[in-house]
Image (cartoon, rainbow, N blue to C red):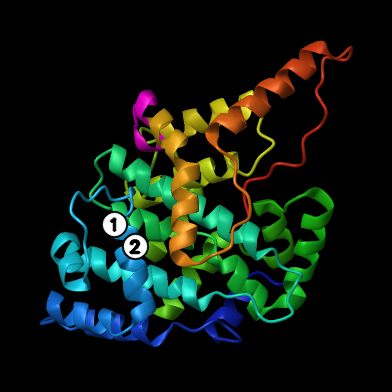
Amino acid sequence: MPHGAIVERFRANENLPSLPGVAVEVLALTEQPDCTIDQLANVIQNDPAITARILKIINSPLFGVAKGITSIKQASTLLGMRKLRIMALSFSIVQAIRRPEGDGAFDYEAYWRQALTAAVASRLLATKTARPITEEAFVAGLLHNIGIVAGYLTAPDLFHPLLERSHKNGRWTVEDEIELLGATHALLSAELLRVWGLPEPLSIGVEHYREAAPLDESRPTTPDLAHLIAAGVSIAELFAGDASMADIELCRTRCIQLTGIDRELLEQVLDAVATRVQEIAGMLVVKIGPTLTYEQIQRQAEEQLSQAIASPTGEASPPRKRGKAA
């Protein structure tokens, strides 16, 4: 297809999911120079569902708050305006992306499992490396592939060949996206964020995360957020299953190169991911299906290696195709 045709459909706003009213109000309010955190809290607490989800997540182990937070006013004092705004937007966006009635072609469980894993991993990496953009990392990780489902809803005719390839090979790759759509999911995601009017640093980080190189090789213009997303996505791909010992070591190396995280701290992140993902999925009321723990991934990789050693040909049973991402 012509390069960028699907991007033009996004810009024309054809069949795109729309933001809930509270997200539109939050964006409009925070664009005003005299906006106060109390005004923001008042807008958010008018939406009971968003309020409940923010309170659940802020009282979860992901935040580690010692004293229970029972109101948005309390949460706003702890979070500050920037973090509260980003959390409200992220939960609103999850509301916006729901499975249409009778739609069985697109695997929404796998989509949300990958997105939430990337979000949780990105935030944990930001926390362990003392980045001041932990909430941005969570939201950007959550949204890094939102262009996939939005693109599917906008242009199902163009996405059908991708779904066929996914059913045949177990998943599709970024190279498949470029071949069949003329654009990557990162670009589609960034365009949707711009259509929605989300903060530009989020759009830039999402658009460029696939280009993020090791810190000592990266261009000065590559935002730190892109490095965190890239590392979080690497972890999400690892947790997709069927990983070999080489895949595990490659993920570790990539995360260290992209974020500078200490190897011991990285192991703590990997150990915590699965539990946190299930917690957040419950808070967001999102179905993600079964998930693997890091221990299970390592055990499966060890079994695969043992099979390869014991096999007369020196090869284990072939895993399903692993690709860069969608």
- Image quadrant assignment for residue 240: top right
Mark number, residue 166? none
What residue does disc 2 label? Answer: 56
Point out the stretch of residues depicted in magenta.
257-265
Query: Considering only vertical position in the picture, is 113 above or below 313?
Result: below
Query: Considering only vertical position in the picture, is 111 above or below 152?
Result: above
Quadrant (top left, top right, bottom left, bottom right) of the C terminus: bottom right
In contact (CB < 8 Å): disc 1 and disc 2:
yes
Q: Amino acid at mark 2?
A: Lys
**What number of labels is visible?**
2
Q: In the image, 47: left or right of 74?
A: right
What residue does disc 1 label? Answer: 59
Residue at left offset 82%, top offset 20%: 315
Query: Considering only vertical position in the picture, is 324 above or below 148?
Result: above
Looking at the image, can residue 212 be seen? no
Quadrant (top left, top right, bottom left, bottom right) of the N terminus: bottom right
Q: Amino acid at mark 1?
A: Asn
Residue at left offset 54%, top offset 66%: 146
Q: Is 262 inside the magenta-drawn segment?
A: yes
Q: Main secondary structure of the magenta part?
A: helix
Q: Element under label 2?
A: helix
Give the percent coordinates (x, y) of residue 171. 73, 52
Front one among 151 and 215: 151
Give the percent coordinates (x, y) of residue 23. 36, 80
What residue occupies the far right of the structure in this picture? 312
